[in-house]
Image: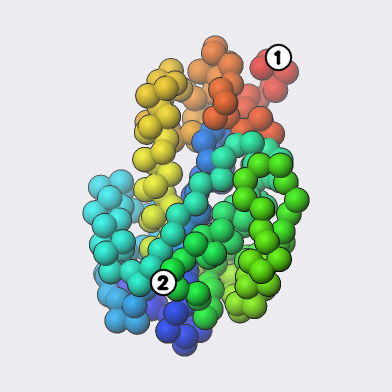
Amino acid sequence: MLEKNFSGFTFETGTDEAGRGCLAGPVTAAAVILPVDFCNSILNDSKQLSEKIREKLKPIIELEAICFSVTHLHPKEIDEINILNASMKGMQECILKLNQTPEFIIVDGNRALNAKLGLKNTFGKQFSKTEIALLKSIPNQSIIKGDSKFLSIAAASVLAKTYRDEYMNQIHEEFPMYNWKKNKGYPTKEHREAIKKYGPTKYHRMSFRLLPDQLELF
């Protein structure tokens, strides 16, 4: 089983994102506070779990968590502030949406959660001064491969992945030719061939290299 806690605080939040490398759809973030006695021997980094296992874990996490939140950041915002900033902003928004203010935050990766706050952008949520101050006040630690080390980050990775997959399944119905139900927006050969044939949609990230030769889009 993964480790239960990093900081020793009761209300420690794990946060993670899914969909950073996709050509279409949102980057989706999640934050989870688990009770100190939470145990689950199956829970792990979502990338190491099958879709069936992730779907089995999702209601367990939602039921047993002290609180959790999920946020989608959509392509226009990703294109404006870049995918790294969008991933971090999504996790920051999740922290603000939690019913319980965290005492400590652990985040998957190598970047502090409050490294950039209050980006001025056209699309998406604008942080207030109070929200920025709150995010700055909560100690946090980035942990490389944290989603395979700590239960709360793994739980966040599962929620981010399952909620994003649900979203991609929904927009697949609008644009079935890209087969997002299968590839979830990742740069598969099939997906790129569909972009070449039909062009990009409103769900594609125009700041990304959608085709090997970007000029073929225009």
Q: Which residue is mark 2?
A: 33
Q: Residue furthest right?
A: 120
**Of the pair 87 and 95, the residue shown nearer to us:** 95
Closer to the camera: disc 2 or disc 1? Answer: 2
Q: Residue at x 47, y 77 (%)?
A: 12
The amino acid type, in three-letter code, at marker 2 is Ile
Q: Residue at x 37, y 24 (%)?
A: 173
- Asked which secondary structure carries label 2, the reply is strand
Which of the 4 image quarters holds residue 74?
top right
Q: Residue at x 39, y 47 (%)?
A: 163
Label 1: few (<14), some (14–19) or many (≥20) C-alpha neighbours in 10 Å: few
- Asked which secondary structure carries label 1, the reply is loop
Q: Position of residue 167 (x, y in %)?
A: 41, 38
Q: Position of residue 198 (x, y in %)?
A: 54, 13
Residue 152, visible in the rendered structure: no
The amino acid type, in three-letter code, at marker 1 is Phe
Whole-angstrom CA distance, mark 2 to mark 1, is 46 Å
Which of the 4 image quarters holds residue 39?
bottom left
The answer to whether residue 106 is left or right of residue 85 is left
Q: Residue at x 26, y 57 (%)?
A: 59
The answer to whether residue 204 is left or right of residue 188 is right
**Of the pair 193 and 133, the residue shown nearer to us:** 133
Say if 89 sits above or below 101 in the image.
above
Q: Position of residue 141 (x, y in %)?
A: 59, 75
Q: Check the picture and name the quadrant holding the C terminus.
A: top right
Q: Which residue is mark 1?
A: 218
Q: Residue furthest top?
A: 197
